[in-house]
Amino acid sequence: MGRHILARVDITAEELATWAVDGVERVLAHVTDLTDDQLVAPLLPTINPLLWEIGHIAWFQELFVLRRACGHEPILPFGDAIYDSGAIPHDTRWRLRLPSREDTIDYVRTVGQRVADVVTDRDTSDVARHFARYTVHHHDTHSEALTYTRQTLGLPLPPLSGLTDATVDFGVADDDWPGDVRLNGGRFLLGGMMGDPFVYDNEKWAHPVDVEPFAMAKVPVTQGEFADFVEDGGYTTPHLWSDNGRWLAETGARHPLYWRRGTDGGWQRRHFDTWVPLEPDHPVHFVSWWEADAFARWAGRRLPTEAEWEFAACSGARHKPTYPWGDELPKPHQAATDWLGKGTVGVGVCASGETQEGVRHLIGNVWEWTATDFYGYPNFERDAYGENSQQFFGERKVLRGGGWATRGRYLRNTMRNYFTHERQDVIAGFRTCAR
């Protein structure tokens, strides 16, 4: 399949302004149908109070764009005291006195519109526009986190604007997805390039690595394949687990978090507030790193390193594309992103998003756990938002690729996500490599 790689260019000021407003509306769409009590939410370590979270998102954008880059006075004189996530411990966020629902929503929209106005002003600096994009992607990160929150709490699908009940065309499903793709390896530049329009600090900067030849699964591990692992006693065989079963003993897990047996004895999974039968050809997700690693051991395989993952996504190219297919934002026939499928899609679709070698779904559908511990690259440069990465080095595993609820504009081949081993609430699955 041929590939036409476009010259990589940054977005225009008008496009960035549209993104700023869109980011706000997507965040708000995740909470507008909820009651005031639901906007508080129970105190859990993996979520925030939703009313606090949407206010924090706006505060972050106001701080970096309007106040620091543009010199504006604060919109909320007390904002720093209630919305600074670096200063306010997680559990304290439930005890804060917050603005009302109406005032919070008004604040979120006011900040977004002012940022949209600023970036289209001809006198606005490139620095302000950079942080405008940075904060749009911060909105994108939190809109996905709000997706996790609704799943965790068993809330219904949110009423997201622009999404209909009509079937999205992800391309014709085929059965050409089992098996491995052989990649020859070689010397490769891992990480973001200095000419890229936007990267995070943990992607800085591209540096040479040697990738040995390897064979990678064409698609992520499916629910059907993972069910075989469960049925074969994968959760009751401690030697398959790299921690010798300690996580199993601590959690009592015997299957993925959102699975249960149906009345007919078959497996079901919870999708927000609804139990549905497993979709055997959809990728498994909401699994921890421990579960992914144990499956790989059971299958006689292994998780890819992040260098192998990025090498595959870029087809080993010296001039790396933004996505496996080039530099254009994802379309449904290339990747399942942006909530368009309202869930995962079968691994037989999105064939147009394959790499030149035939690896599919590297972008979208599910984030993919890798074998790599999250550290800075050799020439790491800390961002202005210093809490983005460095504090987590050595404590988390790297994930790559993005999920069905991730905004396509947020993703790229060099993007690194990172969570602790035990997290099961993330839209995370995995693929394997041959040993």
Image (spheres, grey):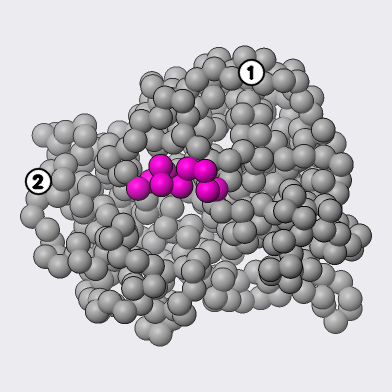
Which of the 4 quarters of the picture holds residue 244?
bottom right
Instruction: Please say if the residues under marks 2 and 1 sit with CB atoms less than 8 Å apart.
Output: no
Residue 182, relative to residue 130: is it above or below? above
Report the front residue among 323 and 69: 69
Give the class, few, some or many, for how many residues have Cα within 10 Å of label 2's Cα (few <14, many ≥20): few
The question of residue 390 being in magenta is answered with: yes
Please provide the residue range marked out in magenta: 387-396
Name the residue furthest right. Answer: 232
* Pointer 1 residue: 210
Residue positioned 48% across, 43% down in the render: 393
Q: Is residue 389 left or right of residue 326?
A: left
Q: Which mark is residue 71?
A: 2
Magenta: main secondary structure = loop
Residue 123 visible in the shown view: yes
Three-letter amino acid code at the position of disc 1: Asp
Residue 45: horizontal and vertical position, in percent?
Answer: 49, 69
Q: Secondary structure at mark 1?
A: strand
Q: Is residue 243 left or right of residue 387?
A: right
Residue 201: horizontal and vertical position, in percent?
Answer: 39, 35
Report the front residue among 230 and 65: 230
Residue 322: horizontal and vertical position, in percent?
Answer: 51, 29
Give the class, few, some or many, for how many residues have Cα within 10 Å of label 1's Cα (few <14, many ≥20): few
Residue 140, relative to residue 322: is it above or below? below
Residue 143: horizontal and vertical position, in percent?
Answer: 44, 59
Three-letter amino acid code at the position of disc 2: Gly
Q: Quadrant of the C terminus?
A: top right
